[in-house]
């Protein structure tokens, strides 16, 4: 089948393609797109990807800049938006939902969601039928974590995600953690400065959060490393003991939580709040907490307990690591993409439509 992926808003990490996917910091949405396209290309489908500054051919997948006219196709997969696709003739339209734009959901045949939770949320708030939902989760590069040659560094905490995932809360409570565990130290990975600059004159809650982070990162025991590629980041995660992730999402932003998968694969214990899809997807494998900011003492106490107790950390991450290696590898998720296209082909070739179920396995 002819498949087109379209993602004009993926501009933060450009240029990106399968050749640099492990050696350059690339966002979760971009990785989801590239690996889905790769799986379908390897299954024999003719795949085109339209992204900012896209170019090159990788296996059976060709990359194109979004300034080029999108070709007609059998299946159109839009990531975040379907703007400027009105001219495209396609049998099926999908939206890869790491977004909450209700105007999109009603214009497509299927909504690809990374968790059952997000599918139900869209159904409840935007009245989109559950039979339009197909669950295709995010995944981790499990091969990067299948090793035992990197020792854990005593007291090391890691943060490797967008700053709006509660980093300002972690930096606020970190001095209390360090006072009780003197060897505690925090290493931070991400490209923060473009967001700091873009929001420095803002008066909204996002700008306030970024300023709190910027003012707090120079405290003792905190090191801002910046953006690194997935290969290097995996080694940093493997050397870390704990992820403290005090999200207090204002709107649903955690439809799956790829950071959790990466950390569990790296044998990192996790403290995180029961918000969005976190409890449903990861609740059995992490220290699940009420969201901040009114319970700082509880967050400090569980963090200190985990830093002091290796057996407790292992209790959390061992089962989670097994789950990740079983269900959340790109090989396993690639099979879901292929299965979905097989079902679409069957549906197109028969008179009676086969409706996908939300809990597609």
Image (cartoon, rainbow, N blue to C red):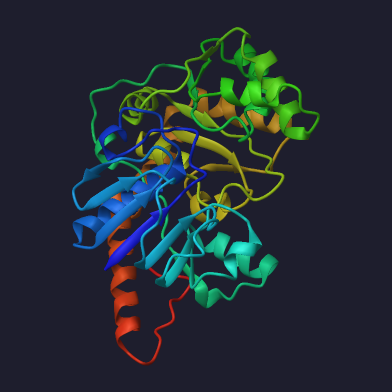
Judge whether 96 appears above or below 249 on screen. Answer: below
How many marks can you see? 0
Residue found at x 62% / y 56%: 100
Residue 163, position in %: x, y?
A: 60, 30
Q: Is residue 325 something that shows in the picture? A: no
Residue 71 appears left or right of 225 = left
Judge whether 166 appears above or below 356 on screen. Answer: above
Residue found at x 50% / y 49%: 282
**To which quarter of the image does residue 289 belong?**
top right
Comparing 312 with 354, the one in front is 354
Residue 118 appears left or right of 203 = left
Comparing 168 with 82, the one in front is 82
Q: What is the residue that sits farthest to the right in this orientation?
A: 203
Judge whether 307 appears above or below 334 on screen. Answer: above
Quadrant of the snapshot with the N terminus = bottom left
Residue 2, position in %: x, y?
A: 29, 65
**To which quarter of the image does residue 359 belong?**
bottom left
Quadrant of the snapshot with the C terminus = bottom left
Q: What is the residue that sits farthest to the bottom in this orientation?
A: 351
Comparing 116 with 74, the one in front is 74
Residue found at x 64% / y 28%: 301
Residue 273 appears left or right of 151 = right
Comparing 307 with 100, the one in front is 100
Residue 77, position in %: x, y?
A: 42, 60
Judge whether 203 appears above or below 339 on screen. Answer: above
Residue 331, position in %: x, y?
A: 26, 53
Q: Is residue 231 something that shows in the picture? A: yes
């Amino acid at each position: 089948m002819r498949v087109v992926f379209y993602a004009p808003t993926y501009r933060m990490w450009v240029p990106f393609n399968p050749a640099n996917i492990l050696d350059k910091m690339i966002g979760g949405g971009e990785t989801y797109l590239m690996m889905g396209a790769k799986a379908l290309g390897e299954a024999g489908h003719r795949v085109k990807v339209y992204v900012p500054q896209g170019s090159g051919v990788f296996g059976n997948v060709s990359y194109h800049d979004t300034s080029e006219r999108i070709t007609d196709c059998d299946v159109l997969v839009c990531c975040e938006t379907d703007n400027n696709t009105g001219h495209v003739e396609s049998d099926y339209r999908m939206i890869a939902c790491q977004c909450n734009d209700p105007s999109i959901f009603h214009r497509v045949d299927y909504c690809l969601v990374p968790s059952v939770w997000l599918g139900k949320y869209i159904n409840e708030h935007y009245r989109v039928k559950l039979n339009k939902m197909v669950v295709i989760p995010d995944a981790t590069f499990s091969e990067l974590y299948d090793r035992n040659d990197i020792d854990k560094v005593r007291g090391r905490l890691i943060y490797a995600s967008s700053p709006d995932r509660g980093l300002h809360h972690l930096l606020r409570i970190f001095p209390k953690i360090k006072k009780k565990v003197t060897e505690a130290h925090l290493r931070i990975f991400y490209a923060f400065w473009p967001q700091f600059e873009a929001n420095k004159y803002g008066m909204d809650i996002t700008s306030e959060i970024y300023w709190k982070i910027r003012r707090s990162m120079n405290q003792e025991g905190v090191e801002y490393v910046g953006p690194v590629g997935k290969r290097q980041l995996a080694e940093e995660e493997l050397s870390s003991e704990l992820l403290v992730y005090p999200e207090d999402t204002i709107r649903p932003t955690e439809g799956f939580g790829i950071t959790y998968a990466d950390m569990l694969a790296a044998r990192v214990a996790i403290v995180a709040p029961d918000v969005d899809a976190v409890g449903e997807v990861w609740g059995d494998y992490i220290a699940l907490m009420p969201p901040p900011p009114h319970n700082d003492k509880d967050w400090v106490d569980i963090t200190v307990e985990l830093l002091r107790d290796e057996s407790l950390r292992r209790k959390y991450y061992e089962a989670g690591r097994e789950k990740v290696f079983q269900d959340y590898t790109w090989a396993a998720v690639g099979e879901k993409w292929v299965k979905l296209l097989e079902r679409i082909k069957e549906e197109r070739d028969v008179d009676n439509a086969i409706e996908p179920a939300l809990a597609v396995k």
